[in-house]
Image (cartoon, grey):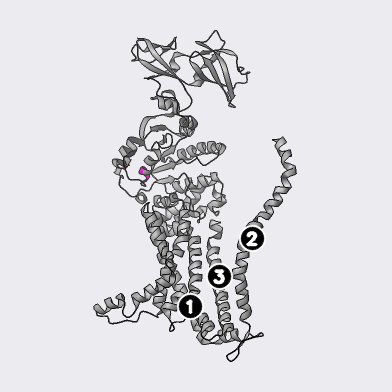
Amino acid sequence: MSASASQALPDDEAPERRVRSAPLILSAPAALLFAALVLTPLLLTALLSFNQFDYATGRTGGFTLEHYLSVLTDGYYLEIFLRTFRVSALATAICVVVGVPEAYILSRMSNPWRSVFLLVVLAPLLVSVVVRAFGWSMLLGPEGPVNGAMMALGFGRTRLLYTEGTVIVALVHVMLPFMVIPVWTSLQKLDPAVEQAALSFGASRATAIVRVVAPQILPGILSGSLIVFGLSASAFAIPGLLGGRRLKMVATVVYDQYLSDLNWPMGAAVAVLLLAANLIIMLTYHRLVEGHYRRRLG
Amino acid sequence: MSFLELKNITKRYGPLTAVGDVSLSVAKGEFVSLLGPSGCGKTTTLQMIAGFVEPSAGTIRLDGRDITRAKANSRGLGIVFQSYALFPHMTVFDNVSFGLEMQRVARAERRPRVEEALALVHLSPYAKRYPRELSGGQRQRVALARALVIRPPVLLLDEPLSNLDAKLREAMQFELREIQRKVGTTTVMVTHDQAEAFSISDRVVVMEAGRITQIDQPYRIYEHPETEFISRFVGKTNLLPGRVAAARDGGATVSLAGIAVDVAAPGLSAGETVTLCIRPEKLRLTAPADGLLAGRVADRFFLGSQWLYHVDGPLGTVMVVTPNDGTPPVEAGAPVGLDWTASVVRVHRGALAEAPDPALEMAV
């Protein structure tokens, strides 16, 4: 014992230094990739948003806050921002309502059904969002089967495309796996005896789920809703294809500014504002929910 | 008058019988342990009493009422889980209060009852803590308080002490028994630890491969194991194969590797193959010439309060345990004699089944 301890002493420092630098070295590739591919374009976008713009000459460099001022004071942009966050919040809420029970039921299934249904839940991720958006527009279009059925039932032709409802439904469809996966992960960590304990003390199954299971998977629900909200608020393909020109969302406005108006600085300003608003909403939400369970669950 | 009665309870999983034809009746206020190696069906039996597993056949009666198919949340039993299964997002107080809330006990009445239960397990100062802020032993007590506060007709303990370290486990054993005596709740405990089962139970049910092999008081099970499996599983034992040389009224002479040994077991007939069981602490070390057998100490182990000797002799290696009474122990290699009285020898009919299962030896 003492022999090995004295032997270990001289060598002690070298491995420690190596160990201390190991995290830096190991995370360097990912950090470099992140800096090159995410931070640099973000920084360039931010710089671009302060450039002056003239319809006759295009981007002219220089420094101005006029794009920010016009976005923040124009009711047109305000409406689009509000719509974007309303649609994202509703899509997130529906994902919680649908995805959490779905994950719970999935976790209670036994194999092989569990694997089969997990695959069914995740399978949509394998199909491009654009393809799925076209699928929805065929389904809900004026000549689509849904309208066909409504006409056959005597409801008349209804405009389903280019409405907020359709965009929300399609967003839920695309985002659901991102809710199911984190909730499923936190359910996996749950001791099944805890639910049994609740039952043994006379709780109904519903009470056991609400009082005992749900609070423990709150971290999973939190991360799921952050992912869903963030992806929905910046979604482009779904609002672009199902909301069209009529129902603009922030991401489609950015696209239009860049490619139709060729007003790059304005598009950049809108993009930066979307990022900032998204960050504020998500951090607030995170703080609220996390504060709720931090002390309890550690 | 049995309070909790299992009658011919069977649980099959496909072709596998986890629990076969188990019948047990527990009197009111009694502390009964189900003891057996892992996979013997003891936990499944407990889960059937709790209502988490439905029996394939048989009936369970509680206080005269058939609860075989009753839902777990309608049985009102107090259960302490092996993992404790505390609600991690609730304080100790809320954990204990949960069962009362579910029974719709008025808020005003809940508080004194929770406080009383916490006082019973000496946890009153910890009421506002969360489970993760408690030690293992404290969590175990919360689980116990939570199960007792609802004043259950039966308390079920699933390996309640197996997650505690040895010292704490021993202290908790006695505390568990003391609390059980105080509140007088009928208790069924599942354990694989025979010391735990023996020290705190009124009766012990030994299970093997899904069946009950013996139900008796701990002392009787230790002294009169009915099968060779029990004598091996419960404590240490020397198993010696022999053949009955001569039978007489109330006893017999058994020949072991050429040595004649008197035993006090009735009903044996000459020529029968038997296995003799002698507990190591029933053997005495004597001077080489004085014992019934002569041998040589092959090895010795210091167990603190006792010495364990391996003695090589005509019967192979025999274990002997002597109390550490302060006198100098016998040295390894020294010649010794082995002596015992005829009444301590237990006789099982038939040959030694097979070499002792190492897993069982571990459990001992």
Spot the residue most to the top.
B289
Magenta segment range? B48-55
**Chain under disc 1:** A
Q: Position of residue A79 (x, y in %)?
A: 49, 83
Q: How many marks?
A: 3
**Chain under disc 3:** A
In the figure, is residue A140 to the left or right of B289? left
Whether tag 1 and tag 2 are in contact, CB under 8 A, the answer is no
Residue that numbered label 1 is attached to: A84
**Taking the image as drawn, is residue B122 in sight?**
no
Spot the residue most to the right.
A10
Q: Quadrant of residue A11?
A: top right
Q: Residue at x 63, y 84 (%)?
A: A51
Q: Is residue B213 above or below residue A64?
A: above
Closest to the camera, between mark 3 and mark 1, is 1
Give whichever of B175, A11 is nearer the camera: A11
Amino acid tagged 3 = Thr
Give whichever of B256, A266 is nearer the camera: A266
Residue that numbered label 2 is attached to: A28
| C-alpha gap between disc 2 and disc 3 | 30 Å
Near mark 2 (Cα within 10 A), the count class, few <14, some 14-19 or many ≥20, is few
Mark 3 or mark 1: whose residue is earlier in sequence: 1
Question: Do the dots labelled 3 and 1 sit on one chain?
Answer: yes
Q: Quadrant of residue B224?
A: top left
Q: Position of residue B165 (x, y in %)?
A: 55, 39
**Chain under disc 2:** A
Helix, strand or loop for disc 1: helix
Amino acid tagged 1 = Thr
Question: Do the dots labelled 1 and 2 sit on one chain?
Answer: yes
